Amino acid sequence: METTLLPATASSERTQAQTYMERYRAPFSLRCGALLIDYILLVGIIAFSTLLARLGRHGPATTSNAEIVGIVIAVIVAAINFIGLSALRGETIGKWATGLCIRQTDGEPLNLRSALLRHLVVYPPAFLVLGLAFLVGDMLIPAAYAGGAFALLLGVGFLMATFNAHGRALHDIIADTIVVREEARRARRLRS
């Protein structure tokens, strides 16, 4: 007797994706640890360049140039870390260190489009608002509003991750991604 498999329905595919997200989703504390490692890397670059600038003996012009070079290097490292490594390997340096990786909600590897969407829709506007807060720092009320908007933009995204059943933050929902434990990658390789 020969049997034929019925084609998978959309509801069974949805169920498989739900099971995948529930089984491998990363705990919020590990996600925070990974983000902290990523930001320590970037802040370390800026702090090191500022330290070099302060040790220089050539006056304010050299000081500001060294700081600008440090900021440019930090922006380049951030782009490589958050977009390049995410698109190529599905993980940032922080996620690698904590054993996490970024996947599509169906379990497929992250692609460049999703990496760009994930990291460029929420973060840059939030940091532009923070920069605005520093620009209007002399005016207390506008600076407070800009700082509050920055906290709201980032805070809402992270609060969503704590209360979301699948642990997905705002940028994960926008890009249709999920942060999972490394075992998910290994399980996908074994099934292939």
Image (tube, rainbow, N blue to C red):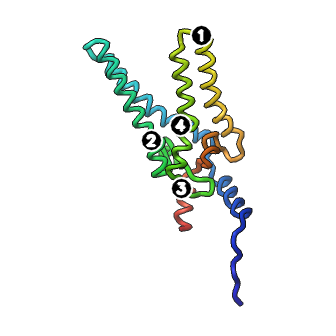
Whole-angstrom CA distance, mark 2 to mark 1, is 35 Å
Q: Earlier in the sequence, mark 3 or mark 2?
A: 2
Mark 4, residue position: 35
Mark 3, residue position: 109
Tag 2: amino acid: Asn
Q: Residue at x 66, y 53 (%)?
A: 21
Quadrant in which the N terminus is drawn: bottom right
Q: Earlier in the sequence, mark 4 or mark 3?
A: 4
Mark 1, residue position: 140
Between 110 and 190, the one nearer to me in the picture: 110
Tag 4: amino acid: Leu
Mark carried by residue 81: 2
Pointer 4 with pointer 3, Cβ within 8 A? no
Q: Position of residue 20 (x, y in %)?
A: 65, 57
Whole-angstrom CA distance, mark 4 to mark 3, is 20 Å
Q: Alpha-carbon neighbours of circle 3 within 10 Å: few (<14), some, or many (≥20)? A: many
Q: Residue at x 57, y 52 (%)?
A: 103
